[in-house]
């Protein structure tokens, strides 16, 4: 954007937010874009890669009140929430609404908080301006609604006048000149009021359409535990499991052994047909055969059986083609349409809507209860599914072109939970542990990181990544991402639940005054569910990890014990 636009965005934010989260804008836009007197009162901190949980940046305590002093005409007073800063942004707990997702009213009432979270996410200036635009539109909308209601009330009053005169004058055929004049005036006023109401309704429709479009492009608010950071290098290390030297020692690699990449191992085991796949489908497709294909199937079956038998999930078989509205419900659309495989309307539509191949089973699993009101007693709902996933990988040109790390088509076992807000945080820990259990059963070294504000996904309020050790690459790579979206998806897809009555109120009856009759208490108003999702696990990357970690110096690959029953008792894959 031009400097003037950047300055407008920054100054608007200053007027509504605290100095503490203004320092995020300083980091994003560069100190040269910030007036010198602001630079004097803002500081930032740095952390190391995968450091312990990030310390939030602070504010200089030497003369902080000067920035907000009454003598500075061009600077605002500190907004509410300044004392509730967490990780450099206003705490979500200060919201005026219990919801953690945004409608126009909630955004308007909590605009400084929303802007602080957008800045923490390193959102673009256009996104920040769009949030302010929503608040402006909401103010216009409130005025229009009041004007429309006044117009409708005026039409009602004038229509009543018309009715009374018509009744008094026998349908307007027997009245005085004064009555007839009043009748015509009331008719004209009623018509004008109705036309005004229709005109205002049209303006409301335009405003609400723009609002909805802007809201759909705003990301979720962040949980207070999410550390501040710009990218994946500033994610917070939560824990590590396993010793990367344990399997090499057990498999007698030796000090001079250089582990092979998974694709080289698969070639040696006569199970890799990448060139043939590319010839028929293009780049980023692969084909497996023989024991390599069987090992991939074994991993899929092991993951599903673990989640169903040990973790209490219900297995589901779901469509691989979904509608635009389904993807909007889980927030892949409208923002990430370039990453999706779209089906031409001539081939297929979903009830008249655009059709897409699924990027993850999260989409159909969560949408199983779209536009539903569940009973609290039905929750939690826990689903898992094995599906191929299809991703265009827009923006990843030239990255991870080798092997199975980044493909247009891959298998994944997905876990989804639908829960109440009260159990949401604990369910997130549980779901993540379920993915960890799979890695630990395979004895694969991994680490767990909490994604920082600049790396976390669009729809998540809190997210853990599990990264498995790949000795061929000599680094950890993501194998599972476990997200709590709060009520962000539920709001978009109309997924609610009805809380159970308090125990001592469940059978309560109240007497109808004056009649001695009894009636049951009113039903409790439905609330938005919380939804969670996670990979349990990405099968292709699990195959990569098994091949690389369980290889031997002679090119064989030992089959992990938990997979041997799925491989017909086969203990080792040997070169052919």
Image (spheres, rainbow, N blue to C red):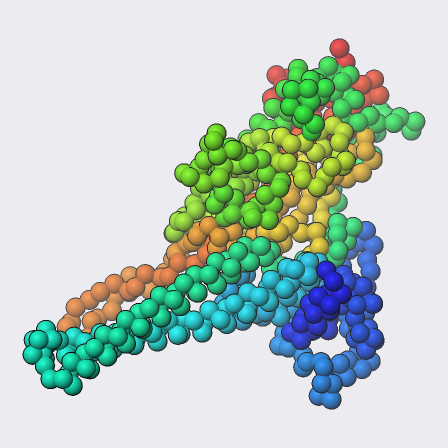
Asked if 232 appears above or below 343 in the picture, the reply is: below
Q: Can residue 303 be seen in this view?
A: no
Residue 17 at what x, y percent from top left? 67, 72
Depth check: give the residue in front, 391 or 249: 391
- Is residue 187 visible to the viewer in this orientation of the structure? yes
Residue 544 is drawn in which quadrant? top right
The quadrant in which the N terminus is found is bottom right
- Residue under the image location 65 percent in, 32 percent down: 408
Q: In this view, does 494 lie to the left or right of 248?
A: left
Query: Which residue is rendered at x = 76% and y = 68% of the image?
Result: 23
Q: Considering only vertical position in the picture, is 354 above or below 68?
A: above
Pick out the residue farthest to the bottom: 71
Point out the residue furthest to the top here: 576
- 447 lies above or below 298: below
Q: Quadrant of residue 65?
A: bottom right
Count of numbered badges drawn on the protein: 0
Residue located 48% across and 29% down the image: 347
Of all residues, the one furthest to the right in this rendering is 256
| Residue 22: x %, y % from top left | 73, 69
Give how far across and how far down residue 553 sits, in percent: 84, 21
Q: Which quadrant is the C terminus positioned in?
A: top right
Looking at this view, is 486 or 491 the one in front?
491
213, 453: nearer the viewer: 213
Q: Identify the residue shown where x is 11% and y is 84%.
A: 176
Displayed quadrant of residue 480? top right
Residue 548 x/y as whole percent? 77, 28
């Amino acid at each position: 954007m031009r400097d003037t636009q950047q300055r407008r965005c920054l100054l608007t934010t200053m007027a509504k937010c605290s100095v503490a989260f203004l320092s995020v804008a300083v980091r994003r836009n560069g100190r040269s874009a910030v007036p010198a007197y602001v630079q004097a009162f803002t500081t930032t901190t740095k952390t190391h890669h995968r450091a312990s949980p990030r310390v939030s940046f602070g504010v200089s305590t030497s003369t902080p009140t000067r920035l907000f002093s009454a003598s500075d005409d061009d600077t605002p007073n500190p907004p509410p929430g300044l004392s509730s800063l967490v990780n450099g942004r206003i705490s979500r707990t200060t919201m005026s609404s219990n919801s953690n997702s945004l409608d126009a009213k909630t955004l308007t009432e909590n605009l400084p908080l929303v802007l602080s979270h957008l800045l923490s996410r390193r959102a673009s200036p256009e996104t920040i301006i769009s949030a302010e635009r929503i608040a402006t539109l909401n103010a216009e909308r409130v005025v229009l609604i009041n004007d429309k209601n006044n117009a409708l009330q005026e039409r009602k009053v004038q229509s009543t006048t018309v009715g009374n005169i018509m009744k008094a004058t026998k349908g307007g055929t027997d009245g005085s000149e004064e009555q007839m004049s009043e009748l015509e005036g009331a008719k004209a006023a009623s018509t004008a009021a109705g036309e005004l109401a229709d005109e205002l309704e049209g303006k409301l429709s335009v405003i609400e359409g723009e609002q909805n479009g802007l809201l759909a492009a705003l990301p979720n608010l962040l949980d207070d535990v999410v550390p501040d950071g710009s990218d994946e290098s500033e994610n917070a290390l939560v824990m590590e499991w396993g010793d990367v030297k344990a399997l090499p020692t057990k498999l007698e690699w030796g000090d001079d052994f250089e582990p092979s990449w998974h694709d080289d191992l698969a070639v040696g085991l006569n199970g890799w047909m990448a060139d043939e796949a590319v010839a028929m489908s293009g780049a980023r497709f692969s084909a497996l055969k023989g024991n390599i294909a069987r090992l991939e199937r074994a991993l899929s079956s092991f993951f599903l059986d673990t989640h169903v038998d040990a973790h209490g999930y219900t297995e589901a078989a779901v469509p691989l083609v979904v509608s635009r509205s389904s993807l909007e419900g889980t927030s892949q659309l409208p923002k990430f349409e370039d990453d999706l495989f779209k089906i031409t309307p001539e081939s297929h539509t979903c009830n008249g809507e655009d059709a897409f191949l699924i990027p993850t089973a999260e989409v159909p699993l969560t949408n199983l209860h779209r536009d539903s009101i569940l009973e609290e007693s039905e929750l939690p709902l826990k689903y898992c599914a094995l599906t191929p996933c299809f991703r265009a990988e827009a923006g990843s040109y030239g990255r991870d072109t080798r092997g199975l790390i980044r493909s247009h088509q891959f298998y994944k076992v997905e876990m989804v939970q639908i829960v109440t807000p009260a159990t949401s945080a604990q369910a997130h820990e549980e779901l993540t542990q379920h993915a960890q259990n799979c890695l630990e059963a395979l004895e694969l070294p991994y680490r767990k990181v909490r994604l920082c504000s600049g790396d976390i996904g669009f729809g998540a309020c809190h997210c853990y990544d599990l990264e498995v050790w790949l000795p061929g690459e000599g680094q950890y790579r993501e194998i599972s991402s476990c997200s709590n979206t709060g009520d962000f998806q539920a709001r978009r897809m109309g997924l609610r639940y009805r809380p159970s009555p308090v125990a001592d109120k469940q059978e309560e009856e109240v007497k109808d005054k004056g009649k001695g009759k009894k009636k049951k208490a009113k039903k409790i108003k439905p609330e938005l569910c919380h939804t969670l999702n996670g990979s349990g696990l990405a099968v292709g990357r699990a195959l990569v990890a098994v091949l690389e970690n369980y290889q031997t110096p002679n090119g064989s690959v030992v089959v992990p014990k938990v997979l041997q029953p799925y491989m017909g008792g086969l203990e080792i894959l040997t070169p052919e």
